[in-house]
């Protein structure tokens, strides 16, 4: 395919922006999104405002190209055939199963690109498909809804369970829940259909329930989960010899997981005596797993559980690089839809990182590439690029196969100036704690403080010279 000269100019100046827009066109084409809505919506319907247009509006907000929905609506005014009120009504009625299907569909398309790019990370456990499970509560919104006014407490619009594939670094599935006070464990039944034979599911102690672990095992899959304090186990024998790991000393023994004094499931209990206490002050961590010993010994199980932080990193990137929590959207369905669109944008960024890994290597990308700066360049250049190259110019990428687009992504990734998206060096820890001063006034004059500091410095210099 021969690209127009304007394409070439943007490829040379900002290849990341071209890569992101081409990936969006491939993974989120309007026809794919509208077909998804028709297939999954139970009560919603399309009259004038297409689902794909609604996604476009919200994409501007979560990617930082518009501060709120009203601003995004004005930017796309010529493409949105309804009033702003109709847009808000559409958002507040998008069913959560449609939002979840949006994440799943786009993740599948992105996975195809990452496979063709050969840009996956090294597997955490060779021979197994690993999934990391964690929950995320949306932050409190503004009190715009009538029912929230007058309350001192912040209104929470919902929560979700997220599932991360650490090989591709894609959030493959999202399980949204409108009730923010629902216990996360109550959503585990919706996770089970996603469990496949041979999987390894890594989860924190909040998801360590007898029913969930037993059901994962029944489906011929495996778990690596921190033991919850309320889970009853019956030991079989003593702990074996300890093996040193980077974070502590690991040992294991066989146990029975019990319910009401009844043995339910046999597992391995890996105990890790930590070199440094956790944030909660714990000096030991107990991890339950049904992985065979030949697949992962005690030290490997401990290291596998440590990789759970990768999903925390994904949540951090969703918060810092993208606007995943839109505090002006009070209705739960609208807030959860915005979060799902942010996850879709995160998955597009994951494809860009996969292309960078394919060209520059996994270690360099992991240590040096900042998701924040990748998203920032995307946001800064995107609007101007879409004026110079309107939407119809990009349709060719939606019609490409994953293999063909991967070829272009790899070529464009080689043109990226890695210094522009490099992480800032970590700050050195402060050696001396700052002394707290009690001020007489609630405000200070910065200019006077600077003048006083200069005078003190001159006095100290004069005293040193006199010695």
Image (cartoon, grey):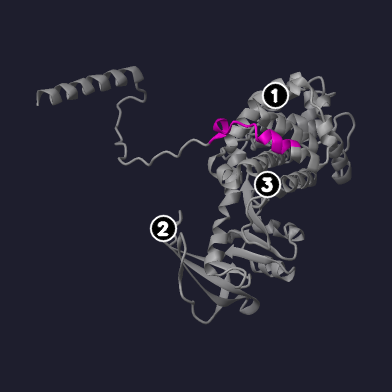
Q: In what quadrant of the picture does the N terminus appear?
A: top right
Task: Report which residue position mark 3 lands on.
Answer: 119
Circles 1 and 3: CB atoms closer than 8 Å: no
Among the 4 quarters of the image, the one containing residue 132: bottom right
* Start-end of magenta stretch: 408-422
Who comes first in sequence, dot 1 or dot 3?
1
> What is the spatial separation of the Cα atoms under label 1 and label 3, in whole angstroms?
24 Å
Q: Is residue 361 above or below residue 267?
A: above
Mark 1 or 2, closer to the camera: 1
Which structural element holds mark 3? loop
- Tag 3: Cα neighbours inside 10 Å, few (<14), some, or many (≥20)? many
Which residue does the numbered mark 1 point to in the structure image?
10
Q: What numbered label is drawn on residue 310?
A: none
In front: label 2 or label 3 = 3
Mark 2 crowd level (few <14, some 14–19, many ≥20, 10 Å Cα): few
The residue under label 2 is: 276
Distance between mark 1 and mark 2 Cα atoms: 49 Å
Percent coordinates x, y for residue 53 in the rendering:
81, 30
Q: How far from the left and from the top, in percent, is residue 134?
A: 63, 53
- For the point 80% across and 28% down, the residue is 394
- Given residues 239 and 214, the one toward you in this image is 239
Q: Quadrant of the C terminus?
A: top left
| In this rendering, position of residue 441 left or right of residue 46 | left
Question: Which x, y percent locates residue 4?
Answer: 79, 22
The local secondary structure at tag 2 comes to loop
Residue for point 34% across, 17% down: 447
- Residue 309: x percent and y percent? 56, 52
């Amino acid at each position: 395919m021969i690209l127009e000269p304007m394409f070439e100019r943007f490829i040379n100046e900002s290849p990341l922006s071209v890569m992101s827009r081409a990936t969006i066109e491939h993974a989120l084409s309007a026809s794919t999104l509208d077909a998804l809505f028709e297939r999954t919506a139970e009560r919603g319907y399309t009259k004038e405002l297409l689902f794909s247009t609604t996604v476009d509006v919200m994409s501007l907000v979560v990617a930082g190209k518009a501060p709120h929905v009203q601003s995004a609506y004005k930017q796309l005014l010529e493409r949105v055939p309804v009033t702003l009120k109709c847009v808000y009504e559409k958002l507040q009625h998008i069913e959560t199963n449609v939002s979840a299907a949006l994440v799943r569909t786009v993740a599948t398309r992105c996975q195809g690109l990452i496979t063709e790019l050969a840009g996956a990370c090294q597997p955490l456990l060779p021979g197994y498909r690993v999934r990391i499970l964690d929950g995320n509560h949306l932050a409190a919104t503004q009190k715009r809804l009538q029912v929230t006014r007058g309350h001192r407490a912040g209104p929470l619009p919902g929560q979700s369970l997220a599932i991360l594939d650490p090989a591709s670094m894609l959030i493959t599935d999202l399980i949204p829940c409108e009730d923010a006070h629902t216990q996360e464990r109550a959503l585990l039944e919706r996770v089970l259909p996603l469990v496949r034979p041979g999987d390894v599911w890594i989860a924190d102690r909040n998801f360590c329930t007898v029913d969930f672990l037993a059901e994962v095992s029944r489906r011929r899959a495996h778990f690596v989960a921190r033991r919850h304090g309320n889970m009853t186990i019956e030991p079989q024998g003593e702990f074996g010899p300890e093996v040193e790991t980077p974070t502590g000393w690991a040992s294991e023994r066989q146990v029975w997981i019990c319910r009401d004094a009844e043995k339910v499931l046999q597992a391995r209990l890996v105990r890790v005596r930590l070199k440094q206490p956790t944030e909660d002050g714990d000096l030991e961590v107990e991890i339950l797993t049904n992985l065979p010993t030949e697949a992962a010994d005690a030290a490997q199980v401990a290291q596998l559980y440590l990789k759970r932080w990768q999903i925390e990193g994904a949540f951090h990137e969703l918060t810092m690089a993208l606007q995943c929590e839109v505090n002006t959207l009070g209705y739960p369905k609208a807030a959860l839809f915005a979060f799902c669109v942010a996850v879709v944008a995160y998955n597009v960024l994951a494809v860009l990182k996969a292309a960078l890994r394919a060209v520059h290597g996994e270690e360099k990308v992991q240590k040096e590439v900042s998701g924040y700066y990748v998203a920032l360049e995307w946001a800064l250049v995107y609007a101007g690029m879409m004026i110079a190259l309107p939407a119809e110019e990009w349709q060719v990428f939606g019609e490409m196969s994953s293999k063909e687009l991967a070829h272009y992504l790899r070529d464009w990734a080689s043109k990226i100036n890695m210094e522009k998206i490099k992480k800032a060096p970590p700050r050195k820890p402060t050696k001396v704690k700052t002394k707290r001063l009690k001020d007489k006034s609630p405000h200070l004059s910065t200019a006077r403080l600077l003048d006083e500091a200069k005078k003190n410095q001159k006095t100290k210099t004069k005293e040193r010279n006199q010695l």
